[in-house]
Image (cartoon, grey):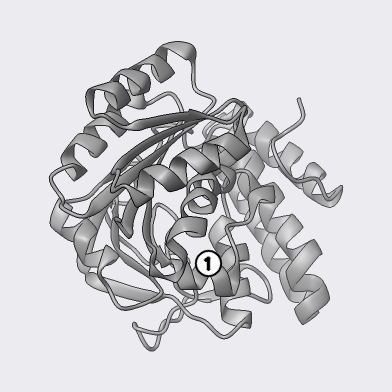
Amino acid sequence: MIGKWIVLLNFNIGQRCIGHAASFAALRDVGVFLVDNASSEGDYAELKRASADSAGLLVESNDKAGNQEQIEAYVRDGGRFVVYRNHVNLGWSGGNNTALRSLTPVLGDRGQFLVMNPDVVIANDAALQLLEHEAQICGPAVYEHYMKGISKYGHDVDFATGFGTGRINEPERISCIAGCCFKIAGRALRLYGFLPDENFLYDEEIKYFERVNRLGGSPVYVPEVRIEHIGSLMVRKRSFIYFYYIFRNRLTYFKEIAGPRYGRYARFTGLYASWCLGVAYANLKLRNWDGLRGIARGVWDGLRGLSGPIVR
């Protein structure tokens, strides 16, 4: 029975996911669990063909009880490729949780899961290094294409506000790691729970790693393993959707978790207002009206305490 799995989440970029799965097939004793988050029928048809060509297991979300039985039997028999079709888009956390919730009942603490966005470029050796790392939760150095450098964003989060401090005194002691690619062990899922479904998109790491840190855990940064994050394959940067979710989710994080727990209301208000005005001004100069509407709607829905997918 295979204990190491790579989790891929697809939304209308099936060919890229299939390419990843084909590359990872060269790794012995590593499985691929590919979740389709309600992509178009044409895109999903590509995944179905790939599953058939690889003797994989194809399941759909309209029979969850039956699916779980099939998945557990398939994994116990040494199966290595699962395609799971969600008929509703569950967002980043919900989609990845589909795989994690399907695999943990059969693998338990022995499970090792590399959660990876399809817009990541990673060598097989790097994927294996992360999967075999002794840490319960770890992540690589991420080269972000949009910033043309290694990102340290999120490594220094102050969970009392959700914003970075700009200070990392001990590189091995960080607040959280990038959600685009990280390893999480079955034991960590048992101790800290699954990813926060309610965010739908963006800022999931802050909410999840606040919980991890509060419960006594900490992620491990593995700078010797390097990946590339292309970004913008499923959601375009500076779009309405992008700004909507990051501004809404940061506000709801504070309202639901950080504010009641840590009480730093004045500090958060100053940081959040400055962030809103700065990003809005930058988009005004670019005449990015779509982005400005996303910021405004995100703030409004955050104040209303909304979560999940946007209601149009």
In the rendered image, the vertical position of residue 19 relative to residue 177, given as above or below: above
Q: 50 or 210: which is nearer to us?
A: 50
Q: Quadrant of residue 281?
A: top right
Q: Quadrant of residue 209?
A: bottom right
Q: 203 or 181: which is nearer to us?
A: 181
Image point 54% across, 61% down: which residue? Answer: 205
User: Is residue 63 left or right of 126 when viewed as pictured?
Assistant: right
User: Is residue 205 left or right of 178 when viewed as pictured?
Assistant: right
x then y, percent, for residue 181? 36, 55
- According to the picture, the residue beneath numbered tag 1 turns out to be 189
The local crowd at label 1, few if under 14, some if 14 to 19, many if 20 or more residues have their Cα within 10 Å, is many
- Secondary structure at numbered mark 1: helix
The mark total stands at 1
x then y, percent, for residue 163? 59, 68
Image point 61% across, 48% down: which residue? Answer: 246
Image point 59% across, 65% down: which residue? Answer: 208
Whether residue 7 is visible here, answered yes or no, is no
Which amino acid type is marked by label 1? Answer: Leu
